[in-house]
Image: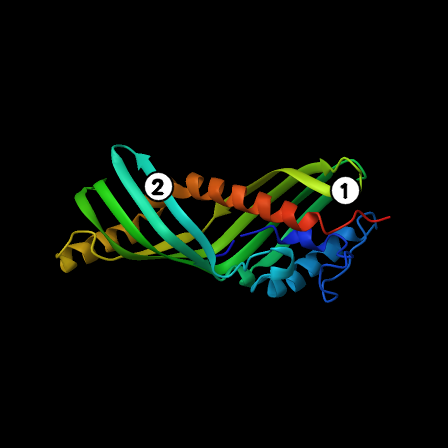
Amino acid sequence: MRNVTVFSVLFLGCIAQQLPASFKVCDHFAPDVNACLKDAILSALGQLKDGLPEIGAVALEPLHIANITVHKFGNEFSFINVMIDHLSTVAVTDLHSDLTREKFWLEFNMTADDIIAEMDYSIKGKLLMFSVDGGGRGELHMKNMVIQATLIGGVTSDGKYYNLDDLNLKLYPKMVKYRLENIVPGQKEISDQINDVLNDTWDLLWDAFKVDLEEILDKFFLEYANNILKYVPISP
């Protein structure tokens, strides 16, 4: 997942010469701006999938997260070189905006059938009722995901561009399916049994690292969005 959700800011009047002409144009202050933004998000996702090197926008698929390390309840979980895929398959289900010449506020939901994350992982401590000290390849399937996004900001000192101060994402999968190899080194049968228990009680592990994942994505997309907004003048 080279990164889940800033997509909308790209479409807020994509009239800068540096952006491709294929990006949908939305008037920030038109009565139908919300409907326009929904269409523009879907159009832009396909183009951002492979990135826009000419403006320094990296590809959104797969989205790369270098490391997520969580210390909770005496346990240590590390997910390394996380690659998140299928972000371009999202659908926008709701969108509201309040755009003026002084402020920027945008809130929207996205849904996806299956967001996939592949990584190397290590885990040490007690997982459910099992004592574990293992690691290897891992895969997560976040099923029927709902992503709630809120973007808040103001304008640049010259008043020509929006600039975000805060970007907040909340992730709500209906289910997470895990496949973690070698949880107990050299004991495939036991590792498989632990995977089965993890999948039966998927929310316990998800809740342990959800907030950390959201915070990493918030930071990434805030920087990503502001890099693009500097090419998108506020509508006249």
- The residues bearing labels 1 and 2 have C-alpha atoms spaced at a distance of 37 Å
Residue in the foreground of this view, choosing between 184 and 227: 227
Counting from the top left corner in percent of width and height, residue 225 is at: 63, 48
Residue type at numbered disc 1: Leu
Residue type at numbered disc 2: Thr
Residue assigned mark 1? 99
Q: Residue at x 42, y 40 (%)?
A: 212
Counting from the top left corner in percent of width and height, residue 185 is at: 15, 53
Q: Residue furthest right?
A: 236
Residue assigned mark 2? 69
What secondary structure is found at the residue carrying circle 1?
strand
Q: In this view of the protein, can residue 52 be seen by the observer?
A: no
Q: Residue at x 74, y 38 (%)?
A: 156
Residue in the foreground of this view, choosing between 179 and 225: 225
Counting from the top left corner in percent of width and height, residue 157 is at: 76, 35
Query: In this rendering, would 7 be left or right of 155?
Result: left
